[in-house]
């Protein structure tokens, strides 16, 4: 069935890949984005990939008037809420900026969507809500104890949505806890385009490969992992995107809250990623070992079984595709959009 979906943050990395899949499934999509961490160029790329039009509202989710107008512009069936700030270090330095953008912004959005009679929301949460639980495989039942500001903003929004769902059961919620998104659309037309020096591993490796950075610093080689480097559950952004479509289908048929991990369940080490990327791009990635990064855990990965049983969803793309698709995007667009 064709639905009309409002996608906040739809011009961003994960949002743009999800919008492509929504359009491919014949949904009508409106992106609401303030372009604080993305480029309007994305819209043209999405249209090139899909041959379909996407509506745009340039607005901030904290701006109540604009959000209200957005809900007046069309009767939406559901909201997918990606808009937010996500840099862990920046959140520590500017906590109020993060609480304002992520928490206040989500509250305004939620109030206005309910006011407009829109009763389904899929929210971008993060594995970071688990904190440091003392085990490496994360199941959804673990207590949430985030260890940074960014993670606390995600937990607060999860609580806000769960509490509202309890009080107003007509609100249907999906909280998707992403592990480490990497990769790009196989066309090479859209991908991750960080501002400045990348914080995250994969975009840093890609910039070394394309000659924009000299070498990667690998933060720590003395972790209790097989090769001593950190291990993460990297998940292809195309798989993450398809998880959102599965969540929308779930909300169309179920009124119980959906709270699931989106990961592969198979962690890779930093060195394994470096080596796989070297193979994909046909050159060695220069690196040096550096001290551990504050706040990093040695290893964690998803238990993805609940998402599989509730949604029939599993991640399908492996490490080779993660690296090949990132490389295609990076080499075709060395300076991003
Ligand atoms: P992104 O920065 O590429 O996309 C976020 C988009 O939201 C951007 O286009 C930005 O311009 C927009 N935005 C930010 N604040 C806004 C505001 N106040 N009003 C309107 N638009 C606003 O990030 P992403 O990697 O695509 O992440 C999407 C969501 O997923 C975020 O909520 C993020 O916290 C969450 N998440 C990301 C990761 C990751 O590693 N990428 C992991 C877990 C969760
Ligand atoms: N790493 C390096 N060098 C770099 C960057 C990263 O060695 O230049 C290492 C890190 O130490 C870690 C691994 O690569 O061991 C992954 O680091 P990322 O920064 O790519 O990702 P994180 O696991 O730290 O965190 C990411 C997002 C968070 C999100 C979390 C969810 O940045 O926002 O995944 O699991 F919450």
Image: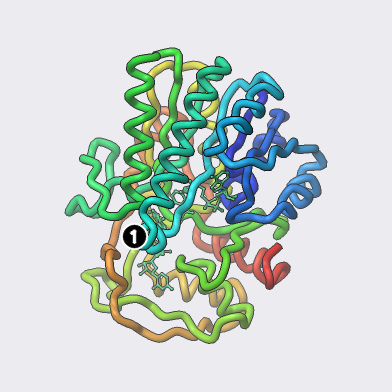
Query: Relative to the observer, which residue lies in front, 234 or 219?
Result: 219
Q: Residue at x 72, y 57 (%)?
A: 189
Quadrant of image for the N terminus: top right
Q: Residue at x 41, y 28 (%)?
A: 310
Query: Relative to the observer, which residue lies in front, 336 or 191?
Result: 336
Is residue 16 something one can see in this rendering?
no
| Relative image position of residue 181 (x, y in whole percent) | 49, 54
Q: Secondary structure at mark 1?
A: helix
Quadrant of image for the C terminus: bottom right
Give the labeled residue for mark 1: 92
Q: Residue at x 36, y 62 (%)?
A: 93
**In the figure, residue 289 lies in which quadrant?**
bottom left
Q: Residue at x 59, y 59 (%)?
A: 192
Give the vertical position of 39 relative to 33 (above or below): below
| Relative image position of residue 95 (x, y in whole percent) | 36, 54
Give the vertical position of 247 relative to 223 (above or below): above
Marks counted in the figure total 1
Q: Quadrant of ligand 2?
A: bottom left
| Relative image position of residue 10 (x, y in whole percent) | 62, 43
Is residue 53 something one can see in this rendering?
yes
Q: Is mark 1 within 8 Å of ligand 2?
A: no
**In the figure, residue 139 lies in which quadrant?**
top left
Mark 1: few/some/many CA within 10 Å (<14, 14-19, 20+): some
Determine whether, in the image, residue 178 is placed left or right of residue 19. Answer: left
| Relative image position of residue 200 (x, y in whole percent) | 46, 66
């Amino acid at each position: 069935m064709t639905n009309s979906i409002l996608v906040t943050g739809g011009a961003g990395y994960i949002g743009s890949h999800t919008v492509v899949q929504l359009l491919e499934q014949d949904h009508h999509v409106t992106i609401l984005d303030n372009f604080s961490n993305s480029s309007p160029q994305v819209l043209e790329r999405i249209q090139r990939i899909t041959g379909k039009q996407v509506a745009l509202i340039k607005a901030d989710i904290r701006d109540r008037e604009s959000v209200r107008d957005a809900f007046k512009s069309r009767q939406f069936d559901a909201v997918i809420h990606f808009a937010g700030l996500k840099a862990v270090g920046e959140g520590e330095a500017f906590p109020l900026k993060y609480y304002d953008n992520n928490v206040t912004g989500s509250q305004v959005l939620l109030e206005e969507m309910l006011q407009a009679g829109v009763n389904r929301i899929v929210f971008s949460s993060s594995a970071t809500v688990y904190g440091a639980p003392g085990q490496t495989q994360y199941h959804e039942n673990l207590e949430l104890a985030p260890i940074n500001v960014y993670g606390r903003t995600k937990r607060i929004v999860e609580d806000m949505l769960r509490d509202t769902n309890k009080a107003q059961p007509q609100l249907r919620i999906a909280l998707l806890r992403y592990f480490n998104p990497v990769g790009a659309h196989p066309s090479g037309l859209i991908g991750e385009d960080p501002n400045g020096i990348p914080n995250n591993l994969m975009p840093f490796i890609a910039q070394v490969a394309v000659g924009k950075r000299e070498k990667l610093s690998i933060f720590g080689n003395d972790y209790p992992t097989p090769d001593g480097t950190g291990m993460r559950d990297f998940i292809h952004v195309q798989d993450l995107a398809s998880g959102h479509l599965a969540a929308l289908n779930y909300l169309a048929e179920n009124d119980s809250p959906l709270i699931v991990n989106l990961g592969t369940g198979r962690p890779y080490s930093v060195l394994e990623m470096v080596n796989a990327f070297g193979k994909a791009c046909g050159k060695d990635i220069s690196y040096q070992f550096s001290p551990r990064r504050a706040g990093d855990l040695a290893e964690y990965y998803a238990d993805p079984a609940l998402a599989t049983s509730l949604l029939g969803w599993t991640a399908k793309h492996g490490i080779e595709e993660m690296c090949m698709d990132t490389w295609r995007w990076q080499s075709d667009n060395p300076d991003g959009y």
